[in-house]
Image (tube, grey):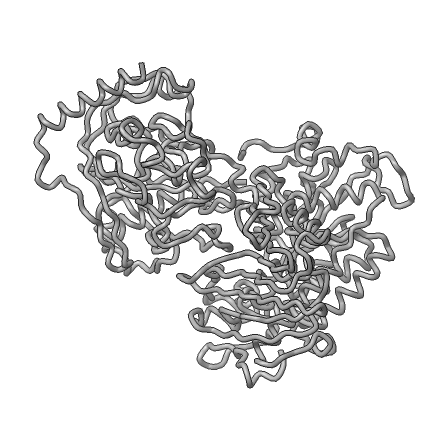
Amino acid sequence: MIKTITKLNTLFFLGLLSNVALSQNFKDYSQQVESASISIDMVAIEGGHFIMGNDQGKADENPAHKVSVDDFWIGKYEITWEQYDAFVYANFDASQFQDDSKLKALGIDAVSGATPPYVDMSFNMGKGSSPAVNMTQYAALMYCKWLTSKTGIFYRLPTEAEWEYVCKKGNTDQNNSLSDIGWYAENSNEKYEKTGTKKANSLGVHDLLGNVSEWVLDQYDPNYYKNSPENNPWNKPSKLYPRVLRGGSWKDTADKLCCTSRQTSNPKWKRRDPQIPKSNWWHTDAPFIGFRIVRPKVQPSKEDIKAYWLEAIADF
Amino acid sequence: MKDKKISRRHFVKESSLVTGGILLGPSLFASPMHTTKKEKTLKLALVGCGGRGTGAAVQALKADSNVKLVAMADAFEDQIEKSHGNLSKIFDKSRIELKPSMKFVGFGSYKKAIDEADVVILTTPPGFRPQHFEYAVQQGKHVFMEKPVATDVAGIKKVLNAAKLAKEKKLNVVVGLQRRYQAEYIELNRRIKNGDLGKIVSGQVYWNGAGVWVRPRTDSMTEMEYQMRNWYYFNWLCGDHILEQHIHNIDVANWFIGELPIKAQGMGGREVRKGKDHGQIFDHHFVEFTYPSGAIISSQCRHQPGCFSQVSETFQGTLGTSYTGGGNTAILKSYDGNNIYKHDGENDKNPYQVEHDRLFAAIRSGEEVINNAEYGAESTMTAILGRMATYSGKEISWDKAMNSDLKLVPDEDMLSFNSVPPVVPNELGEYPIPMPGQTTFY
């Protein structure tokens, strides 16, 4: 049954691609942030319909249901330490950013930076082009806000639907042996590896499954699929826990590494934070979670952008 | 979590989850002279109401269902109010019985708060710790105090003397060197003492990171208020990061080796972090500690963004090596590369909570009297010895350091926000910075 659905999806996607001419401007690119000496590779993803969820999966993957998402770009790789530290240790003087009027047009009143961590947050697993880990979902989203204010282009985390769309459309867990495309408990050396060391999916996106679990924008609700809207669903968070992560990590066993598995955030991930309130920016015990970014092809209105900049919720 | 306040009644259900069997064990019913029976409400005072102090208060209130916070003290009123507000979001009023008159603000306010309590939490900047600890012990209070326990040699001596008095009075003292309460460290220490690594001959201990917060000066601040707010960068208050953070890793060396160093030499300076708001502390230190058994420990600490970062401890013994560091991982390896032991601590208890679980269990049972003040002072002194070596550029023996009359901290009871602090900036706003080869002693 799972296979049948997937085959249908595949045919559907192929049809979609052959019928819709890709717009000239809508292609892969590399987002340069010269003042921060980083660049982030982005892959163009033609939107469309797909079947989200899995009737044969866990209860929270039910029911499989039709969803459509708009065009967007998604990070070719998980955000690396090099790219993340550019934000953590950035200069937050206003002069560093787009001018005020441009920022306001992007729904940004102010940009603030993560507090520097007291300890080495890579837990000795490597930095540079290895994926950044241990950040909260809020911090990952504030990274997007920082990037937006540096570039004048709206970036955010993927929604759960967008993430699953890229995973399924790219046949990530179908055409390859899992070991060729991802790092997980059975093949990792009990740590993450540099991004992009495994094969990409058919859309050219690396490490969707495994290496580090990836933050998406949604609040976790096991029943969300029962009533979610068809177009661009997003379960906007109102509570701090639990929120959704996708893709599984170097710590997870192979069964977690599929396009439909939903993982949830856990207060335990801050259990060694000695301060009250606990950090808005860092986990102390989550060296297996990271994120990648998304840019919607049609930039939303200022008001719509504002809705994405979630407020921090104090964590006791 | 936000809405779930913890009341006393509710707590009975939770406490067995939090503390395991400790509170409910048979020792509870033994009644030596100094047993504090379970029915007695233990009154708690918080001295130093920053994020860490508030965290410690939460852990104390969670450790024992019959503890009430009755007094708070801080140099700053806003810190007390913020802390009280945060605690009120976690616990209901039955746990925080805090009349407005029980909030004590300013220099010297510690005495009034300590007077009200049975158990005190001492979490101000470390420069004040010796004076607070001495007073608490004199008044017969049980103590949780954060590391480091002093910033100068005079303070170390005060803490060691008070530690003796605490022993005589059978007062429990827990020091916030939480690795001593963390399962993988306890297990590795046990195995090392059991001879699994043979004799330790060398080691490397690290706290290399990017640095910590800065609290810039505002126009309304007196010099004293500025230094108290931005305390990390002033030696009399903080002791430099070799004390304030790296003490954790240095303490592991002392603990695992089971000795204190006889001498130290090293180097350090300010290379990257040297702005006006960065006071007088170094941004890197590298120290070689020599132990009586001949073991040499290299100690590195750095506050420089964009560099190799690591917080861990490794030791080489005659039979193998050990590694402890982030991620709850601990490993003993033989020289042929095989694991002798590997600890996966993903589900271990929060060591900050264990500190308080142990403290309150000991107070209740009266069977065990915990006194961490001595090793807390010794490891603080080891870090001070390292700082003396990097500031002076000289080799310095433990004995010479202990005989120093180094005193950085004035009597708190004599201070006000209009007092002149022990260090002041020159007309350019720069503070005196130690200079290796020129600084004679520090």
Left or right position of B432 against B252: left
Query: To which quarter of the image does residue B107 belong?
Result: bottom right
Can see residue A311?
no
Left or right position of B432 against B157: left
Q: Position of residue A117 (x, y in %)?
A: 47, 54
Where's the C terminus of chain B, which quadrant? bottom right
Q: Is residue B429 above or below residue B174?
A: below
Query: To which quarter of the image does residue B37 belong?
Result: top right
Q: Position of residue B130 (x, y in %)?
A: 72, 64
Residue at image point 39% right, 46% down: A193
Left or right position of B270 against A150: right
Q: Position of residue A175 (x, y in %)?
A: 27, 28
Residue at image point 36% right, 54% down: A128
Residue at image point 60% right, 40% down: B88
Residue at image point 54% right, 81% down: B436
Q: Position of residue B230 (x, y in %)?
A: 52, 64
